[in-house]
Image: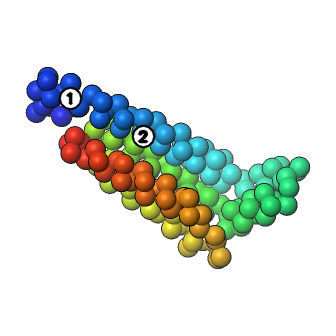
Amino acid sequence: MPEELTPSANENLEPQIRLLKVLCILTFVGSGGGLFSYGFIGINPEWFYESASKGMNQEMLDLLKLITSPGRTFLLVMAALHAFSFVGALLMWKLKKLGFHSYAFAQILVLITPLLFIRGFPTAGINVILTLLFILAYARFLKIMR
């Protein structure tokens, strides 16, 4: 909590801080999952594609092929961006404004990076909407961060 706040001001902020922490937990799950999956696949994309493709329907197989098509660099860049997003959420958990800026920057790059690496990559509207909603939700807490 910001040091300049009085104990009564801290009590008034508790519901806001709880909501901020719920958002952070959701980000830990999403960004942690992205870091793990992109990182794991990035270590050996060919092996992952071979192993994971067994028993998949054609639509999932096409999506997997599309995501692994740019190769290791793309996958590791995406893992790094998810790590950056995770760290941003961790800093916001500690009420640091830098965390908001790190998170927002990383999330915008997560949306843009596939477009740079994969020709014809279909941007899912729900991803854009969720990213914007999370950034706007976190922005509401900037006044309690230092």
Q: Compared to 73, does 19 lie above or below?
A: above
Left or right: residue 102 compared with residue 121: left
Q: Nearer the viewer, residue 120 or 44?
A: 120
**Residue placed at 49% from the left, 54% from the top?**
130
Q: Compared to 26, does 83 lie above or below?
A: below
Q: Which residue is mark 1?
A: 12
Circle number at residue 25: none
Left or right: residue 9 compared with residue 42: left
Asked if residue 77 shows in the view, the reply is no
Q: Nearer the viewer, residue 138 or 61?
A: 138
Secondary structure under the numbered disc 2 in the rendered image: helix
Q: Nearer the viewer, residue 44 or 51?
A: 51
* Mark toward the start of the polypeptide (2 vs 1): 1
The local crowd at label 2, few if under 14, some if 14 to 19, many if 20 or more residues have their Cα within 10 Å, is some
Q: Compared to 13, does 52 lie above or below?
A: below
Kindly give the residue lying farthest to the right in the view shown.
55
Dot in front, 2 or 1? 1
**Residue placed at 54% from the left, 44% from the top?**
30
Circle number at residue 23: 2
Q: Nearer the viewer, residue 108 or 128?
A: 128
Dot 2 and dot 1 residues touching (CB under 8 Å): no
Q: Quadrant of the N terminus?
A: top left
Q: Amino acid at mark 1?
A: Asn
Left or right: residue 50 compared with residue 38: right
Q: Compared to 77, does 92 lie above or below?
A: above
Q: Amino acid at mark 2?
A: Leu
**Residue placed at 28% from the left, 44% from the top?**
141
Kindly give the residue lying farthest to the bottom in the view shown.
119
Residue 88 pos. (x, y %): 38, 46
Secondary structure under the numbered disc 1 in the rendered image: helix
